[in-house]
């Protein structure tokens, strides 16, 4: 099973559309999320479940991280969704509207049972938890550490703001706290932090501004709802040439310092400290994962 | 049975048509070109205006067995073909050779009906879309002579070599004076360039200009000159400007088409030929319109402007002209109302003769100087042969247009298509109908990757340029296998031995034939 280590963009693909499922394999998103929830009407759920099962099990897009978003934790379809989704062997299952650690444990247990029945190694199926309510945000830390299956939290801004009585805006101030709290939970748990959807697919400039915020805060990736958003999102989470150059200079300066037994390493008038080194290594690791030329071993 | 250099099996003769296989011999170019044009005499201050199409048919002396022609600049908005054919039927004239520049889907007129009742018994065009094409291919309509399908550049050649001698040309124009100076650029229903009809005006024995807008003498601008026109007829309406587009003019949101268009623009920008004064043809259709936009962005980024844009023109190209990105727009066809109006309002937007665009057997054509040509396709095979005519079910789906001309003429010819359509692959082992020889195709662009043709004359150069730009091609075999993996292997289309159409190349040789399909 091929896996990319990057999780810059995850594209929702409607489970009811064979054409969209087919085309998704050719898009540049790092992660493909086959959706059984919002994009599928109640009467088409059965057909979509079968379609997604076959698509993931037998026509898995190469080089992508593959997820299946199941219906809500209290939805009548959840049992059958999990049954099909786990057996399809995606990289992860994406759970909508997770609010407590207990919910994660319940799903974790059920997935474990299906894995056992299907002969899938225990724990192979990861979980991405969508955090999209005030309660979910409040419990983000517990959710992030509830099970080793949980490898990412993803903020869902629309439902969250509705639960807060907030109005959605392009600046995103109304989700600032939620972003920070989800991000912090991810960092404490050592898992991936995924930012909320930017829903106006025609406003690519707005998307760029939103990404500037998300990337600046520290997110690892963003959920997208239309393929035209992918390139912009990928670019935002890929280090720039300038960042790569600077990171190399930092590490070179440190190496020289070690060689020359200099106590304190100074670059451009500033002391090179541990956080600077860590950031530099992180940038080069991301760049290498994105297939950019970084010359030499830096990890 | 013969096999041409593309490996296509051809009969030696179809009806009275003698097949000259593609790649067999060079064309003699030092021959005198022919015309059917008659001298005509006119009196001072006279008028050529007649009261009806029937009157014009009588005045032209149209008789059974003759050859008539039309142009397709109004595309699906054309209202002239239907009116003329109805008048012909009224006079009881039959056994005609119908030789328009293209047969498009006309909603107001059933060409098939005229073939069924014997009014038309021979067809020569760049493609036969719609009911007639399907009926010919499934054998429900049978003609004794095969349909002869020619790319745009081959039609003027065939006319000037005497292979297609036109008796009466009916030219739909949006405005004319009573003496036959006429145009597609002004009037109530404009179509823009009349480029496809110039050769007909010059070469037909009789020429009838049909308009819905009579203007004072002299008509200005005038694309068709009075010296070629025998009669003028005014009708209520010649066509619908809103339908001249080959596709919607707005930018597609289809991610697949956008991806393909983006890749094409990246290939062009990577090429060493993408420099100040380069030239291009992007065409119409969703991918082409998006490609024009992305190309414009690349040009802006690199500070490069083009010397000319060629062929069927959309408003995207007009935007580039207005922005100073293109010095001259050489317009053989107008693909939307804004592009149609631009010839009149902008000095650098020129209406050009189709022969000037694409006829390889003249003293020069614009394709000889074209750097980049972007082309659509129904199917491409692992030899890079392109099918522009028949769909996966063996039905008539398209026309040759200028595809084979542009592929050979452009330095870098780029064929675009989705890797699969619905449940059938479009990158295949062997195209059902070969229209454009693979050796003239530089590369194929799909959403699943780019394949370079190792047998193209600029392969080495293009490979180097893409490598330098960090663009990684795949092989055409990989694309074909991927397509097959997605869709499975379709059942082969079964055919009989009966040939219904021959596909001519630019030089009049035969690249392939289309056989009757067993459904």
Image (cartoon, coloured by chain):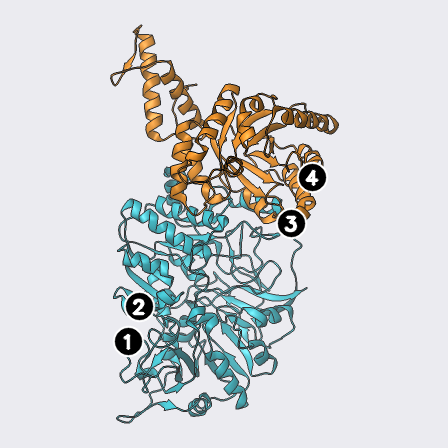
Chain colours: A orange, B cyan
Give the answer, above or below, for where A114 lies relative to B462: above
Q: Chain of mark 3?
A: B
In the drawing, does residue B366 fall left or right of residue A110? left
Chain that bears disc 1: B
A9 or B367: nearer the viewer: A9
Q: Which residue is mark 1?
A: B221
Q: Secondary structure at mark 3?
A: loop
Read off the residue under disc 3.
B489
Which is more N-terminal, label 2 or label 3? 2
Instruction: State which quarter of the image contains the C terminus of chain B.
Output: bottom right
Q: Nearest to the eye among marks 4 and 3: give it.
A: 4
Note whether residue B363 is visible.
no
What residue is pinned by disc 4?
A: A77
Q: Position of residue B52 (x, y in %)?
A: 44, 89
Point out which mark residue A207 bears: none
Mark number for residue B343? 2
Determine the CA span between mark 3 and mark 1. Answer: 55 Å
Identify the element where label 4 is drawn.
loop
Nearer the observer, disc 4 or disc 1? 4
Q: Are marks 2 and 4 on the same chain?
A: no
Q: Residues within 10 Å of mark 2 (few under 14, many from 20)?
A: many
Question: Which residue is more in the foreground, B483 or B299?
Answer: B299
Please report, as a chain letter, where disc 2 is located.
B
């Amino acid at each position: 099973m091929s896996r990319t280590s990057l999780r810059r963009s995850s594209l929702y693909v409607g489970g009811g559309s064979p054409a969209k499922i087919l085309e998704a394999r050719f898009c540049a998103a790092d992660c493909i999320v086959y959706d059984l929830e919002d994009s599928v009407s109640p009467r088409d759920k059965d057909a979509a479940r079968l379609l997604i099962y076959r698509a993931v099990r037998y026509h898995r897009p190469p080089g992508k991280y593959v997820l299946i978003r199941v219906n809500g934790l209290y939805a009548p379809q959840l049992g059958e969704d999990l049954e099909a989704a786990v057996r399809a062997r995606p990289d992860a299952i994406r759970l909508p509207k997770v609010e407590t650690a207990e919910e994660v444990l319940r799903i974790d247990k059920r997935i474990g049972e299906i894995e056992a029945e299907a002969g899938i190694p225990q724990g192979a199926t990861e979980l991405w938890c969508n955090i999209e309510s005030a309660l979910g945000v409040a419990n983000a830390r517990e959710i992030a550490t509830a099970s080793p299956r949980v490898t990412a939290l993803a903020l869902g801004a629309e439902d969250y703001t509705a639960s807060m009585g907030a109005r959605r805006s392009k600046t995103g101030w109304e989700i600032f706290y939620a972003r920070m709290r989800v991000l912090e939970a991810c960092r404490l748990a050592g898992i991936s932090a995924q930012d909320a959807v930017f829903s106006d697919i025609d406003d690519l400039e707005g998307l760029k501004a939103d990404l500037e915020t998300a990337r600046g805060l520290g997110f690892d990736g963003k959920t997208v709802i239309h393929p035209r958003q992918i390139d912009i999102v990928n670019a935002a989470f890929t280090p720039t040439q300038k960042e790569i150059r600077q990171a190399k200079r930092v590490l070179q300066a440190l190496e020289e310092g070690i060689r020359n037994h200099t106590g304190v390493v100074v670059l451009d008038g500033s002391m090179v400290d541990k956080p600077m080194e860590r950031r530099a290594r992180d940038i080069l690791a991301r760049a290498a994962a994105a297939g950019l030329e970084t010359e030499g071993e830096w990890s | 049975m013969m096999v041409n250099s593309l490996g296509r099996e051809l009969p030696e003769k179809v009806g009275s048509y003698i097949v000259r296989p593609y790649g067999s011999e060079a064309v003699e170019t030092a021959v005198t070109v022919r015309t059917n044009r008659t001298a005509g005499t006119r009196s001072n201050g006279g008028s050529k205006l007649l009261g009806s199409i029937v009157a014009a048919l009588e005045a032209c002396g149209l008789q059974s067995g003759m050859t008539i022609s039309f142009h397709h600049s109004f595309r699906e908005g054309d209202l002239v073909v239907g009116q003329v054919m109805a008048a012909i039927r009224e006079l009881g004239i039959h056994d005609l050779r119908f030789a328009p520049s293209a047969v498009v889907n006309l909603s107001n007129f059933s060409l098939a009906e005229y073939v069924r009742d014997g009014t038309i018994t021979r067809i020569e065009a760049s493609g036969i879309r719609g009911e007639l094409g399907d009926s010919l291919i499934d054998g429900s309509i049978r003609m004794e002579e095969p349909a002869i399908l020619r790319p745009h550049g081959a039609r003027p050649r065939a006319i000037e070599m005497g292979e297609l001698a036109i008796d009466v040309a009916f030219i739909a124009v949006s405005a004319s004076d009573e003496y036959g100076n006429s145009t597609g650029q002004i009037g109530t229903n404009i179509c823009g360039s009349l480029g496809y009809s110039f050769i007909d005006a010059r070469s037909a024995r009789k020429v009838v200009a049909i308009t819905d807008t009579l203007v004072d003498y002299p008509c200005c601008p005038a694309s068709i000159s009075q010296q070629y026109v025998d009669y003028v007829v005014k009708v209520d309406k010649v066509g619908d400007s809103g339908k001249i587009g080959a596709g919607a003019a707005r930018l597609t949101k289809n991610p697949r088409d956008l991806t393909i268009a983006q890749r094409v623009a990246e290939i062009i920008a990577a090429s060493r030929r993408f420099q100040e004064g380069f030239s291009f043809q992007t065409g119409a259709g969703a991918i082409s319109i998006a490609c024009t936009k992305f190309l414009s962005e690349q040009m802006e980024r690199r500070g490069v402007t083009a010397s000319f844009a060629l062929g069927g023109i959309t408003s995207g190209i007009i935007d580039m002209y207005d922005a100073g990105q293109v010095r001259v727009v050489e317009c053989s066809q107008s693909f939307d109302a804004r592009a149609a109006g631009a010839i009149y309002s902008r000095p650098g937007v020129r209406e050009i003769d189709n022969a000037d665009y694409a006829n390889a057997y003249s003293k020069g054509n614009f394709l000889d100087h074209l750097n980049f040509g972007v082309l659509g396709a129904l199917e491409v095979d692992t030899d890079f042969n392109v099918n522009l005519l028949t769909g996966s079910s063996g039905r008539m789906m398209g026309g040759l247009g200028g595809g084979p001309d542009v592929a050979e003429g452009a330095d870098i010819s780029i064929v675009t298509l989705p890797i699969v359509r619905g449940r059938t692959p479009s990158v295949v082992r062997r195209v059902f109908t070969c229209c454009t020889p693979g050796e003239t195709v530089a590369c194929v662009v799909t959403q699943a990757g780019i394949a370079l043709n190792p047998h193209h004359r600029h392969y080495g150069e293009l490979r180097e340029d893409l490598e330098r730009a960090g663009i990684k091609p795949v092989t055409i075999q990989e694309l074909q296998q991927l397509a097959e993996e997605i869709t499975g292997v379709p059942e082969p289309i079964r055919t009989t031995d009966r040939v219904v159409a021959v596909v001519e190349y630019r030089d009049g040789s035969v690249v392939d034939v289309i056989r009757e399909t067993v459904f």
